[in-house]
């Protein structure tokens, strides 16, 4: 019985093997062709590296508008929030009291001038009396007495004239002071700039040198403040030893500023001040730059005091550096990287160190063409029958410097990144990266 079971099992096993041998072989996975990718070689151009900081804008001049005299506010003559020129009328204080003071001082001056003329006439008379006494005198006691009396009268009248002249000078000073106070009733802008809202309305009593009426800030030129770490300052000092860069303490250093959603640093200025010591609590030094804030379209100035700002300061002189389109860059956990196609046609991942944003296409009016970096296909393939010609030119939106990780002869993938993976084959379609060509006038 046992031998029969073994024999039956052997027969079943043989039958199963025969059936398995009759089934068709499992098909292999289909092989896809290597993707065609657009590659460019880095362009080597002079690039300057930068330090980048965060800071804020501030006005170069600010004025608090106050009254120099006490009185009731009669008129507000400006539009709140607009720009005013220097010496523009802003407020009027009630003039009645100060006009009366001017008239009173003017009357006192006229009175003193009349007294001067009166004493001058009396002096002339006294001198005539003295001359007559001298001519008629016979040398007696009576004639001598008359002479002394006439001389004394002349001296008194001369003294009175001097007192009247002093009163005249005092009256002139009082009139000048009254006119100054009257002038203070017209409050004018001490500087040109953007004026705030009025803090006091018409009809309110204004106290001299106390009541704040409004403020004005200069906006055509602005400061930008930022705190630079002492390590950056030391690095700059070491760079000074080896390069021709200007010194912070002796010459102007350029800087560039960006605000809001600006991707670049379009506002140029220069450093005009740094503190004389490092702040020990933070290990930073306060630096100030100055930049222009010109009037743009429709009389608008883009920059405002108090705005958050990004500041870029050059580290060193320009050095030849590879640059590539920013579209080539990818990001991962290990940092920024690019894909390159090696001479064997295999895609390789390269970690790179990204430097300065070297160029960005400027914002222009619609329909206005500007010189731009472009990638050009030098050997375009002939178009297939019934198909439009292949693209031969790509405008580049942004170009960045690569300070480490790339060589000038590397073929960096610009288009087709979605179709490649590391260590897989790819067919490179090599394009040429060209810088902007300025239009000839």
Image: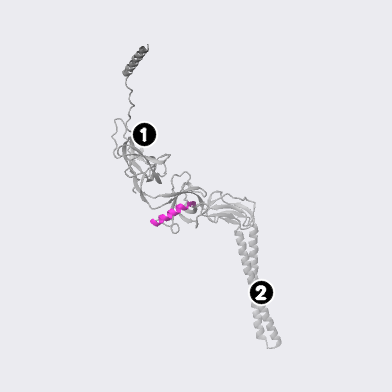
Where, quadrant-wise, is the N terminus in this rendering?
A: top left
Residue, far right: 142
Mark 1 Cα-neighbour bin, 10 Å: few <14, some 14–19, many ≥20 = few
**What secondary structure predominates along the stretch shown in magenta?**
helix
Is 231 covered by the magenta stretch? yes
The quarter of the picture where residue 262 lies is: top left
Mark 2 Cα-neighbour bin, 10 Å: few <14, some 14–19, many ≥20 = some
Read off the magenta span. Answer: 224-242
Q: Considering the numbered disc 1 on the image, is that residue within a helix, a strand or a loop?
A: helix
The quarter of the picture where residue 396 lies is: top left
Q: Which mark is residue 419?
A: 1
Which residue is disc 2 drawn over? 160
Residue 137 picture location, percent across and down: 67, 86
Q: Which residue is drawn at 36% across and 34% down?
A: 419
Work out whether residue 214 can be spotted.
yes
Work out whether residue 243 can be spotted.
no
């Amino acid at each position: 019985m046992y031998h029969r079971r073994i024999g039956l099992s052997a027969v079943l096993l043989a039958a199963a093997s025969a059936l398995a041998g009759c089934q068709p072989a499992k098909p292999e996975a289909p092989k896809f062709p290597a993707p065609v990718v657009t590659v460019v070689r880095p362009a080597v151009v002079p690039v300057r590296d930068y330090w980048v900081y965060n800071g804020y804008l501030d006005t170069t001049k600010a004025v608090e508008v106050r009254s120099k005299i006490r009185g009731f506010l009669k008129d507000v003559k400006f539009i709140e929030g607009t720009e005013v020129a220097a010496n523009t009328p802003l407020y009027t204080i009630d003039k009645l009291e100060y006009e009366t003071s001017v008239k009173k001082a003017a009357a006192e001056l006229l009175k003193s001038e009349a007294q001067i003329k009166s004493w001058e006439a009396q002096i002339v008379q006294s001198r005539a009396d003295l001359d007559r006494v001298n001519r008629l005198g016979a040398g007696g006691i009576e004639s001598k007495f008359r002479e002394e009396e006439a001389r004394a009268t002349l001296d008194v009248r001369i003294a009175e004239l001097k007192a009247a002249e002093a009163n005249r000078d005092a009256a002139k000073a009082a009139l000048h002071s009254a006119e100054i106070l009257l002038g203070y009733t017209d409050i004018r802008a001490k500087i040109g700039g953007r004026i705030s809202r009025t803090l006091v309305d018409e009809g309110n009593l204004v106290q001299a040198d106390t009541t704040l009426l409004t403020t004005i800030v200069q906006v055509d030129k602005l400061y930008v403040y930022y705190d630079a770490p002492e390590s950056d300052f030391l690095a700059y000092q070491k760079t000074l030893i080896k390069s021709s860069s200007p010194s912070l303490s002796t010459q102007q250093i350029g800087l560039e500023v960006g605000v809001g959603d600006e991707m670049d640093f379009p506002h140029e200025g220069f450093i005009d001040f740094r503190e004389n010591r490092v702040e020990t609590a933070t290990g930073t030094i306060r630096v100030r730059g100055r930049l222009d804030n010109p009037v743009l379209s429709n009389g608008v100035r883009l920059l405002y005091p108090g705005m958050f700002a990004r500041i870029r300061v050059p580290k060193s002189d320009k050095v030849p550096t590879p640059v590539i389109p920013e579209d080539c860059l990818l990001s991962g956990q290990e940092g920024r990287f690019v894909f390159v196609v090696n001479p064997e046609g295999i895609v390789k991942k390269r970690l790179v160190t990204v430097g300065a944003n070297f160029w960005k296409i400027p914002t222009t009016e619609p329909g206005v063409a500007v010189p731009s970096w472009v990638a050009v296909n030098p050997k375009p393939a002939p178009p297939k029958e019934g198909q439009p010609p292949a693209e031969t030119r790509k405008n580049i939106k942004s170009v960045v410097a690569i300070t480490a990780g790339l060589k000038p002869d590397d073929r960096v993938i610009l288009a087709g990144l979605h179709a490649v993976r590391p260590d897989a084959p790819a067919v490179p379609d090599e394009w040429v990266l060209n810088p902007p060509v300025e239009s000839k006038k």
